[in-house]
Structures are given as structure tokens and as C-alpha cells.
Amino acid sequence: MRVSVVAVGKPGALSREIRDYEARAGRYWRMEVTEVSRGRGRVARLVLQKEAESIRARLRPGHRTVAVTREGRHFSSTAFAKWMERMTWGPERGVQFLIGGAYGLEAGLREECDLAMSLSALTLPHDLARMVLAEQLYRAGTILRNEPYHKGAE
């Protein structure tokens, strides 16, 4: 199954760790990462609109679209792995995860998504959210193949 991550901006301080987990996740999923440029300006609404336009231009038709946002559905690692497994057998060609910039994702873009998923109830810095998502995609792959990486009960 194809897994796409469309993220606003390039990674900074956690760049090496993000790339490492994305490469690890690539052992289990056909990974594709697209970075779109950050919106410029001081008006949040305009920045969000610009970023949403850039993200929409990169979306793949026929893919399940997931907004990564703190208001979204919470998964345990095991539940996320099972959800990913169901996506493998579903009618969609793949799953695309959207990670917004400093202001998050535009409301209209969030509403267009099939699912809103939360990595934490806390507000996470962009790089940390991207790293956590990549690590959870890797972890989901190891859980589904019964590999020893995941040690938790859930």
C-alpha cells in the first residue's frame, strides 16, 4: 500500500531522525514524502489558505486522506496498526497524511479529509509531529509482522 506524507516545510533540528524513521517505515509501506513550502505573511488566515492550496495540489485521487491534528481521533499503537492493515485491504489505493505548518491545517482542508487523527492532545512542533508519525508508521509495520520492535501491550 502507498503511504504518502504531505508536510508543510522542510524538517529542521530533527531532520536526521525524521529521515531515519521514514526510511524504516519504507520497509513496510511504499512511502512517499512531499514537502510543500510554508506560507509567508503575518495574517494566519492567508498563510493557511496558501499552504492548503499547496497541499491540495499534491493530493492523490483515490487515496484515504488523514488530517494530522490534535483535535483528531486518538489511536493506540496497536489500534493504529490494525487501522493501517484495514486500509491495505480497502478500496483506496493508499493513505495520505497531511501535516500543517505553524498554524495547523486550514479548516476547509481538514473538513475535506476522510479522517482527523491526533498524535497527542498537546500541540507538537512541526518536526516532532512528523517524526512521531514516521515512527508510528514504522511501529505499525513491525506490529503487523510480529517483529520485536513494539514492546507495549497497546
Image (cartoon, rainbow, N blue to C red):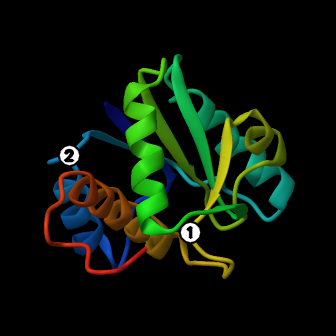
From the viewer's perspective, is 123 left or right of 83?
Answer: right
Q: Amino acid at mark 2?
A: Tyr
Please state which of residues 82 and 11 is positioned toward the viewer in this rendering: 82
Residue 53, labelled with which disc? none
One can see residue 44 in this view = yes
Mark 1 falls on what kind of element?
loop
Q: Is residue 136 above or below residue 93?
A: below
| Residue located at (58% from left, 36% from top) | 65
Mark 2 falls on what kind of element?
loop
**On the image, numbered disc 1 is attached to which residue?**
119
For the C terminus, the image quarter is bottom left
Q: Residues within 10 Å of mark 1 (few under 14, many from 20)?
A: many
For the N terminus, the image quarter is top left
Q: Residues within 10 Å of mark 2 (few under 14, many from 20)?
A: some
Q: Amino acid at mark 1?
A: Leu
> Could you say where residue 126 lies in the image, as x and y percent from the top left?
53, 70
One can see residue 35 in this view = no
From the viewer's perspective, is 65 left or right of 127?
Answer: right
From the viewer's perspective, is 37 left or right of 14?
Answer: right
> Could you say where residue 48 lies in the image, as x and y percent from the top left?
75, 51
| Residue located at (40% from left, 59% from top) | 10
Q: Quadrant of residue 124?
A: bottom right
Q: Earlier in the sequence, mark 2 or mark 1?
A: 2
> Could you say where residue 72 lies in the image, as x and y percent from the top left?
71, 59
| Residue located at (21% from left, 59% from top) | 142
Q: Is residue 100 above or below residue 49?
A: below
Please state which of residues 36 and 142 is positioned toward the viewer in this rendering: 142
Cβ atoms under marks 2 and 1 closer than 8 Å: no
Q: Is residue 147 above or below residue 64?
A: below
**On the image, numbered disc 2 is attached to which residue?**
28
Please state which of residues 61 and 84 is positioned toward the viewer in this rendering: 84
Judged from this view, the residue extending furthest toward the front is 153
